[in-house]
């Protein structure tokens, strides 16, 4: 490449930049809804610009669709990388420390063509109106489910144009979005406890438990804990100071003293729970079993593979 571009080349770059700016707000809305992080969305949009600046746009029939494909693929790769590292975006929520006692992707490159939804400005406005509650639910989805749902349901992108991005058939992509839609609408039976406790009631019980444990409210804990409550810890949690098993309300209450100060609410596999996540990195998950409206068991999960399987989402 000529290190000293001609005036014609400079004019072309300026024109390309101006054209890109007309799409920026929509691209950022797409990336933000896929990633749930303003900072990461800006990174994805910047990457789209860099790829555009290196591309012969004469071969691109629909620049808006091309850019949306690039942003979607970049965002999907970022989601998958985040899931692999089990990291959470720093601007998706605040983290509180809790120290346990004791020692111790998709193919890169844009796809040409495609309509990518009508009235993109209106779609971007609708997407940006989605609040934190929606982002929390979206964070329970797999990367492919999240991308299929966001592009189709929020931006009107046809399934046959989403399919190449998630490397599925259009029919399989439709199923991804359908599963995501059920979860978002709260109709996924997998979000209820085995005893039929609703997600909302489960959250209320765990929030009340956290408040009582932090405040040392033994009487309040009595109403929340099953008389035969048990706390179990996996081998990794035991290695950092937890007891393998604790039974009964008095022993569990004593165990909780001082250990819940830095715990924070989270979704574990779509169900309400608690985690210790210093600096936004999940170290220990508290998985609750609720029976008859009371907490029957708390499992402390610190094994990395088990934490990955829980698909933790900070609240």
Image (cartoon, rainbow, N blue to C red):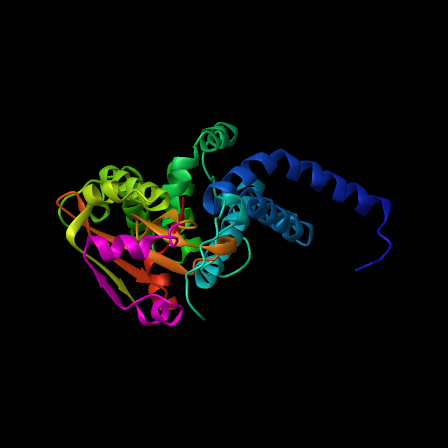
Q: Quadrant of the N terminus?
A: bottom right
| Residue 222 visible to an observer of this rendering | yes
Q: Is 232 above or below relative to 216?
A: below
Q: Is residue 310 left or right of residue 49?
A: left
At 21% from the left edge and 43% from the top edge, which residue is drawn?
Answer: 224
Q: Quadrant of the C terminus?
A: top left
Please tell me which residue lies in front, 292 or 98: 98
159 in the magenta segment: no
Residue 296 lies left or right of residue 19; in this view the side is left
Q: Quadrant of residue 236?
A: bottom left
Q: Position of residue 126 (x, y in %)?
A: 45, 29
Part of the protein shown in magenta? 234-260
Which quadrant of the figure has residue 277? bottom left
Above or below, 121 relative to 305: above
Q: Is residue 112 visible?
A: no
The answer to whether 94 appears left or right of 48 in the picture is left
Instruction: Give percent across and percent down for residue 35.
Output: 48, 47
Residue at 84 percent of width and 57 percent of height: 3
Q: Nearer the viewer, residue 256 or 209?
A: 256
The residue at 76%/40% (across/down) is 14
Task: Say whether residue 258 is magenta.
Answer: yes
Front residue of 61 and 83: 83
Relative image position of residue 40 (x, y in whole percent): 56, 48
Expressed as whole percent of the image width and height from the top left, the position of residue 217 reads 30, 42
Total label count?
A: 0
């Amino acid at each position: 490449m000529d290190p000293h571009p001609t005036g014609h080349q400079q004019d072309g770059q300026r024109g390309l930049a101006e054209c890109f700016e007309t799409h920026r707000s929509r691209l950022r809305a797409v990336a933000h809804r896929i990633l749930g992080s303003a900072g990461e969305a800006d990174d994805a949009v910047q990457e789209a610009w860099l790829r555009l600046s290196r591309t012969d746009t004469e071969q691109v029939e629909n620049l808006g669709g091309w850019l949306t494909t690039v942003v979607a693929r970049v965002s999907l790769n970022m989601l998958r990388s985040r899931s692999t590292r089990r990291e959470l975006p720093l601007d998706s929520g605040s983290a509180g420390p809790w120290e346990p006692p004791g020692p111790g992707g998709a193919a890169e490159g844009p796809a040409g063509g495609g309509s990518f939804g009508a009235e993109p400005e209106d779609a971007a406005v609708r997407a940006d109106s989605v609040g934190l509650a929606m982002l929390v639910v979206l964070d329970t989805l797999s990367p492919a489910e999240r991308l299929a749902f966001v592009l189709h349901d929020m931006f009107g992108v046809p399934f046959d144009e989403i399919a190449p991005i998630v490397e599925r058939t259009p029919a399989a992509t439709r199923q991804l979005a359908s599963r995501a839609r059920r979860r978002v609408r709260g109709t996924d039976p997998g979000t209820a406890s085995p005893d039929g406790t609703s997600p909302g009631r489960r959250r209320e019980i765990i929030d009340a438990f956290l408040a009582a444990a932090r405040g040392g409210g033994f009487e309040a804990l009595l109403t929340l804990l099953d008389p035969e409550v048990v706390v179990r810890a996996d081998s990794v949690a035991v290695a950092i100071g937890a007891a393998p098993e604790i039974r009964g309300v008095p022993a569990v209450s004593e165990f909780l003293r001082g250990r819940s100060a830095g715990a924070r609410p989270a979704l574990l596999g779509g169900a309400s729970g608690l985690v210790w996540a210093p600096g936004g990195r999940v170290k220990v998950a508290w998985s609750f079993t609720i029976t008859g409206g009371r907490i029957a068991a708390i499992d402390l999960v610190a094994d990395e593979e088990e934490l990955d399987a829980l698909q933790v989402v900070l609240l």
